[in-house]
Amino acid sequence: MTIALGRNSKWTVRPEHRDKIRRMFGEGLGLQWASPAPPVDQYNLGSGTIGVIYEDGALSEQEAQKGAWLELLVDDPERVGAALEAAGVKRIEYQDKTHPYFQVPGGPVFRLAK
């Protein structure tokens, strides 16, 4: 039996984080919307997608930090990390110092890996 993660993810965040998330994906990760259809923004990442759903009842930023963490594979984690910081994305300190960790504005934590 083989088990693997699928290619699609969904993040639910509060609507007040929409502009910061769009800046994170655009300026920080260099991505554009695949299909913006309120209340969902969809982004293509390699062969998969991330759908960001904006709902008033989403978890707080502190609650979201306790949920599942993700890993984004990039060619140059240091360069992408610097771009994320320049776009205002919050860097997270974690015991693993070999990867940079960030928190999606109002959403989950992710790390960058090569």
Image: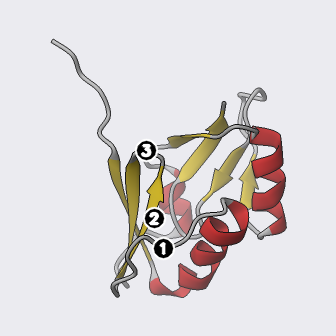
Which of the 4 image quarters holds residue 76?
top right
How far is disc 2 from disc 3 in space, using C-alphas?
19 Å
Reading the chain from its start, which is encountered first: label 3 or label 1? 1
Which residue corresponds to the image point at 82% horizontal and 41% vertical from the top-left? 78
What secondary structure is marked by label 3? loop
Q: Label 1: which residue?
A: 33
Disc 3 packing (10 Å; few <14; some 14–19; many ≥20): few
Give the vertical position of 23 relative to 113 (above or below).
below
Reading the chain from its start, which is encountered first: label 2 or label 1? 1
Q: Label 3: which residue?
A: 68
Disc 1 packing (10 Å; few <14; some 14–19; many ≥20): some
Q: What amino acid does circle 2 point to?
A: Tyr
Q: What amino acid does circle 1 point to?
A: Trp
Reading the chain from its start, which is encountered first: label 2 or label 3? 2
Quadrant where the image shows the N terminus: top left
Q: Label 2: which residue?
A: 43
Which residue corresponds to the image point at 78% horizontal and 29% vertical from the top-left? 97
Residue located farthest toward the top when viewing the structure as drawn: 1
Give the vertical position of 50 relative to 27 (above or below).
above
Q: Position of residue 23 (x, y in %)?
A: 66, 75
**Residue closer to the observer: 14 or 86:** 86
How far is disc 2 from disc 1 in space, using C-alphas?
5 Å
Q: What amino acid does circle 3 point to?
A: Ala
Are the residues flagged by discs 2 and 3 in contact, CB closer than 8 Å?
no
Q: Position of residue 61 (x, y in %)?
A: 55, 66
- Indicate left or right for 14 with 57 as reference: right
Are the residues flagged by discs 2 and 1 in contact, CB closer than 8 Å?
yes
What secondary structure is marked by label 2? strand
Q: Position of residue 40 (x, y in %)?
A: 35, 78
